[in-house]
Amino acid sequence: MAPTSIINNQEKAQTPLKAKSAAGSNDDDFNEIVVKLANLKPIGFAKASKDIVTGGDKEWVDRLPKTTRERFEKYGVDLSDGYPYIPESDQIPKFVDEAFAIRSEDYPFIERGKNADPEKKALFGAAKDVIHLTPYIGTEIVGLQLSDLTDQQKDELALLIAERVVVFFKDQDLSPQKQLELGHYWGQVEVHPQAARAGRDLKGVTTIWQEYQKERAGYPLSFKNSKIGNSQWHSDLVHEHQTAGITHLHLDAIPPFGGETIWSSTYGAYDKLSPALKEFLDGKTAIYKSAHVYLDRKNPLRGPKHVEREHPIVRTHPATGWKYLFVNRSMTDRIVGLLKAESDVILNYLFKVIEENRDIQVTFSWQQQLPGLKSQPEGEQTYRGTSALWDNRISNHNVIHSEESINGRHGTRVTALADTGYFDPESKSQREALGLSLD
Ligand SMILES: [Fe+2]
């Protein structure tokens, strides 16, 4: 942490806090404590058990998996300052109001799938195969490189994702820069204020590297404690003003086994509810919280708080026009207007519907394309990377992590933020729209 950034943070923190100190206490002592708290770890990493390295990590760059390093070197990702890059302390919000203010204004959003060809002739016509993995969630596109898609194909892919929730592309030769460019096409790319990323200038290319998180940040994943963080059912970035739409995870290194990801369709979850419960939920809103925590400027000594944002519980997807349930166990805190006890009962039921109905879920094994498999055709034995693109609005997901399966697993994620979320009372559920049985 550079000395100048400490001074800046102190100045920022001290100004509003002096007047708020308790009568009779020593202002200087109070401010000093607050500044120390604000710079702790930093605060956003309050759950980390180790001190956080900021800037380029020089110790971990040599631990990059082989296939990741090959990808980065091929596409000129600068590793000379270390890897990954973590924003410096003065870039990281300390107070909950600072974090709330990030992207809190409306940003123009074009729903790319909205006017796409419903038959998706350009996309499907160019693919070798289109494989639906379950009746209503999960499709694999075979024989197309994401980096070669035309705008028309990108629009059709956006519609396919809006309909099928998650779409997979194996054997991809995809640069982090191209992945970012695709994200910009589908929406405002989320730039995380403190998450590790692929480089100082690769804003929006988030590093997904659990092995790093565990060892470097003390992320407490173990055999006995394997249901934590992204191993719990969740949806990404629901505390944003415009929540996450098309989210693109590209794994450029995979372990020999484990680490499957499961997605659940919240179109399907909504259709599992009775008409009376649907009617009760339609038009209601809930409070959604951030994964990271910050200090309350007015009560800094009370400890870390989440950013909170209000959204409709039932939303309408702008591309399909279908209603979906917008809740997840990790980040949906409470339904507005209900007693906490009532809200807990209803939300818990909704979480169970999403999590326990296997028919509205798809489980994806990244190992279907292992490096060096003898059964793969000659010349195709090198793992190049697999992409999963899902719509965070209409899904929950989690990863099956074990201590063993995080080793050698690395990827980059780019998230395109979507609409602010709305509920159209005239819109239909997926099964209503498709003329399927509602029993
Ligand atoms: Fe996630």
Image: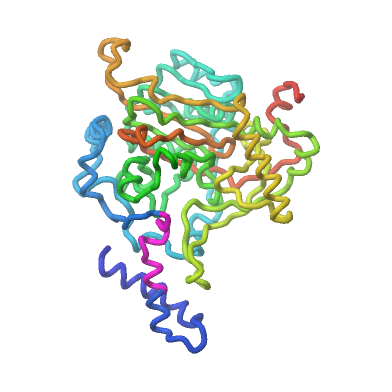
The N terminus appears in which quarter of the rendering?
Answer: bottom left
Q: Which residue appears at 46% of the width and 35% of the height?
A: 399
| Place of residue 283 in the rendered image (x, y in percent of width and height, measured from the top left) | 73, 46
| Place of residue 59 in the rendered image (x, y in percent of width and height, measured from the top left) | 21, 48
Q: Is residue 104 magenta?
A: no
Q: Can you see residue 400?
A: yes
The relative height of residue 94 versus residue 18 in the rendered view (above or below) is: above
| Place of residue 363 in the rendered image (x, y in percent of width and height, measured from the top left) | 50, 26
Q: Can you see residue 184?
A: no
Name the residue at the front extreme.
224
Name the residue at the bottom extreme.
24
The C terminus appears in which quarter of the rendering?
Answer: top right
For the residue pair 234 and 153, the one nearer the viewer reads as 234
The relative height of residue 160 versus residue 227 in the rendered view (above or below) is: above
**Magenta stretch bounds:** 34-47
- Residue 127 horizontal side relative to residue 307, left or right: left
